[in-house]
Image (cartoon, rainbow, N blue to C red):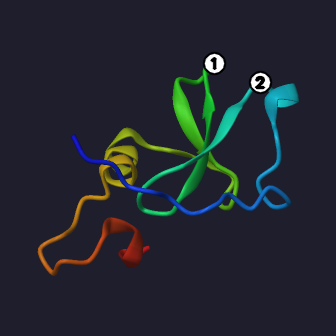
Amino acid sequence: MGYKVLGQIDRERYTDLSHEGLEGPFMFSSGKVLYYDPKEGKYYDRDSDFYVDHKEMWNVHYDFKNEAGRSSQAQS
């Protein structure tokens, strides 16, 4: 089984939000940093101030590529 070393999370930008009931921050292989909200059962994107839908979360988590070979995050 292989592994991938991810970059460091900017702790000044992505602070601890446990006082708001969120877990994280978590960095994914796409480079996206998200928090998990156990009450909502969804990941929260602090940059956009939105919850990530399940389809987009699948793309973020697995860093899926589209037909052109770009990651799903490169399109946004």
Mark 2 touching mark 1, by CB under 8 A? yes
Q: Can you say which quadrant of the picture contains the N terminus?
A: top left
Determine whether 72 is above or below 44 in the image: below
Seen at 25% across and 47% down, the residue is 2
Seen at 42% across and 62% down, the residue is 30
Determine whether 54 is above or below 71 in the image: above
Q: Earlier in the sequence, mark 2 or mark 1?
A: 2
Q: In the displayed structure, does residue 10 sit left or right of residue 34?
A: right
Which class describes the residues within 10 Å of circle 1: few (<14), some (14-19), or many (20+)?
Answer: few
Q: In the displayed structure, does residue 27 sit left or right of residue 22?
A: left
Which class describes the residues within 10 Å of circle 2: few (<14), some (14-19), or many (20+)?
Answer: few
Q: In the displayed structure, does residue 4 sit left or right of residue 7?
A: left
Q: Secondary structure at mark 2?
A: loop
Q: Amino acid at mark 2?
A: Gly
Residue 31 coordinates in the image, percent (x, y): 50, 63
Q: Can you say which quadrant of the picture contains the C terminus?
A: bottom left
- Give the alpha-carbon distance from disc 2 to disc 1, as whole Å: 8 Å
- What is the number of callouts on the image? 2
Q: Which mark is residue 39?
A: 1
Front one among 44 and 61: 61
